[in-house]
Image: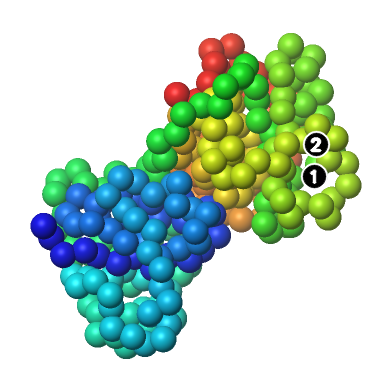
Amino acid sequence: MAEPVLVVRRAALGDFVLTLPVIRALTTIAPVFVVTHARYAPLLPPGATLHDDTWLWRGAPPPLPFARAFAFGDVAAEALRAVNLAVHAVAPRPAPGVHAVDHYAGVLTGVPLPEGAFVRAPRVDWAPAPGPAAVILAPGSGGAAKRWPLDRWRRVADALGDRGVAARFVRGPDETDEPGWPPDAVCPDLPGLLGLAAGCRAWLGPDSGPSHLAAAVGAPGRVGVVFGPTDPATWAPVGARVWPWDTSPADLAAWAGASGFTHLD
């Protein structure tokens, strides 16, 4: 069996999702151990395992004979080199106009991968949540500037209702700083979010981790993302429909409620 490789990727949810093509590619050549937030464990592909990094920050020897390590920032790269690991690293932020997936894939330079091992679109396999398919509206984002105003999302929901299409609001646990959330908005954990994304009729949101997750779980052509201050050329979920900041809520609802959208499959 090939010696294992180590990936150090502590990041926000969206950035981690955009790193999944690298992790999946590496599983074709060796067992992969991933240092990341424990809550991301359900996103790891077969062949990749969550790994504790306590030893690394103590400067202790690696607990496994890692053939090489992969890092997405200078701090992690320096810590890995300090324990004498061969490191493949890229800067944490892409250059303007370069998509994040392509930037992160730079760590694979010089790695002998089988043909077709790197698939650019992130993918997470998950079963749909039970229940009727609805359009999921997930307005939240870790960056307040990236949030489309909540009143516009409520107008999207109203327009969907006028078309006879059910809409369901999803919020994150920290999204309490903006008034106007519908009282029936759900706040799922990560497995619950995956199930909603896998089974929904369509997914709408801003530039956010859940939007990237939705595109990775299902058909990305049924994920619509409203972009404002960030550049979709770098940060758009792979394959998602990008909408500009001045999009009409009625237009967004018409797209999401179009006939033929049954679920993300």
17 left or right, relative to 232: left
Q: Please give the name of the residue rendered at 45% of the width and 63% of the height, measured from the top-left corner.
A: 36
Residue 259: % across, % down: 59, 11
Residue underneath mark 1: 149
Q: Quadrant of the N terminus?
A: bottom left
Report how far apart the C-alphas of labels 1 and 2 lie in the structure.
6 Å
132 left or right, relative to 55: right
Q: How many marks?
A: 2
For label 1, the SS is loop
Picture layout, residue 16 above or below residue 155: below
108 left or right, relative to 112: right
Residue 123: % across, % down: 39, 40
Marks 1 and 2 in Cβ contact (< 8 Å): yes
Towards the viewer: 44 or 169: 44
For label 2, the SS is helix
Q: Is residue 221 visible in the rendered structure shown here?
A: no
Q: Is residue 219 visible in the rendered structure shown here?
A: yes
Q: Quadrant of the C terminus?
A: top left
Residue 210: % across, % down: 58, 44
Picture layout, residue 20 above or below residue 224: below
Amino acid type of disc 2? Arg
The single residue placed furthest to the front in the displayed view is 63
Q: Please give the name of the residue rendered at 17% of the width and 54% of the height, measured from the top-left corner.
A: 29
Amino acid type of disc 1? Pro
Mark drawn on residue 152:
2
The single residue placed furthest to the left in the displayed view is 1
